[in-house]
Amino acid sequence: MTEALLDNEPLVRMGCFLFMLIGVALWEVAAPRRHTIISRWLRWPNNLGIVALNSIVVRLIFPTAAIGIAALAESRGWGLFNIIALPTWVAITASVVLFDFAIYLQHLLFHAVPVLWRFHRMHHADLEFDVTTGSRFHTVEILLSMGIKFLVVVTLGAPVVAVLIFEVLLNATSMFNHGNVRISSRLDRKMRLFIVTPDMHRVHHSIRPEETNSNFGFNFPWWDRFLGTYRAQPAADHENMTIGIERFRTQRDLWLDRMLVQPLLGDANAHPIHRNT
């Protein structure tokens, strides 16, 4: 089974990526949450361009990806769940939940440390908020995230299938919760008890630092609620809130070449958590 997962992992992830990208994009057309000003013809080629670049770089530097590290840890008996005998379903469920908590903590770290914020702010510098924003991350951040992910995988000794489930889940929910899609407020309140919704995560992309410093979760909303970083709604309503950060406000900043050099520009200390305290 492990060999089959390793062989088919790229196809599974690509299939899920395309399914969610197309599905959420169609939803955005049918029921948009916000009126968009900047054309998709400008933003999408650049946002998807960084996705393509990141995919190539990651495969070149980390050819086995996280699922390969999980298989290695399993064969060597490394990590908590390879030492403690647990039912497979318990190890898988616990791994997925703990992975999500690790991603929440990593997200906090990238907002708190100036040099890390330099790379992460590219994600926040998108002037609109839609499905492609969910994959718009600087290449260096992606590489650092992979290193952190490998460390968590080895520490937990997570089952290979748990790693694949989480990788697919993280990719899918990131596109979903960045979607410019309309969900009724009643349904949204119920959904965000179990999953991060677009209205919940959109607050995190506000230009207001105190809102940028909230709602760090990607999959599960519980960490924000338990650790005091949850904010239900933006100060302005969702239709009128300003997306992005103050430093990069021109359409030229949305081009791929500008995205890649953004970490070199501006003050490293002008990051949200310190500006907000």
Image (cartoon, rainbow, N blue to C red):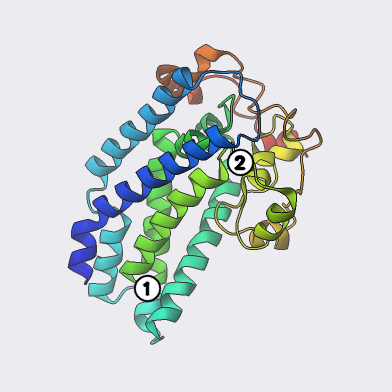
Q: Nearer the viewer, residue 244 or 21?
A: 21
Report the residue at 78% width, 35% height from top: 237
Q: Quadrant of the C terminus?
A: top right
Say what amino acid the circle numbered 1 marks.
Answer: Gly
The CA distance from mark 2 to mark 1 is 29 Å
Dot 2 or dot 1: first in sequence order is: 1
Report the residue at 34% width, 72% height from top: 159
Q: Secondary structure at mark 1?
A: loop
Q: Give the numbered dot on residue 211.
A: none
Residue 54, compared with residue 256, is above or below; it is below
Q: Nearer the viewer, residue 241 or 58?
A: 241
Q: Which residue is mark 1?
A: 79
Q: Which residue is mark 2?
A: 111
Q: Secondary structure at mark 2?
A: helix
* Residue 154 point in image, percent of width and height: 36, 66
10 Å crowding of disc 1: few (<14), some (14-19), many (20+)? some
- Residue 268 left/right relative to 83: right
Regarding residue 58, the answer to whether it shows in the image is yes
Report the residue at 61% width, 18% height from top: 37
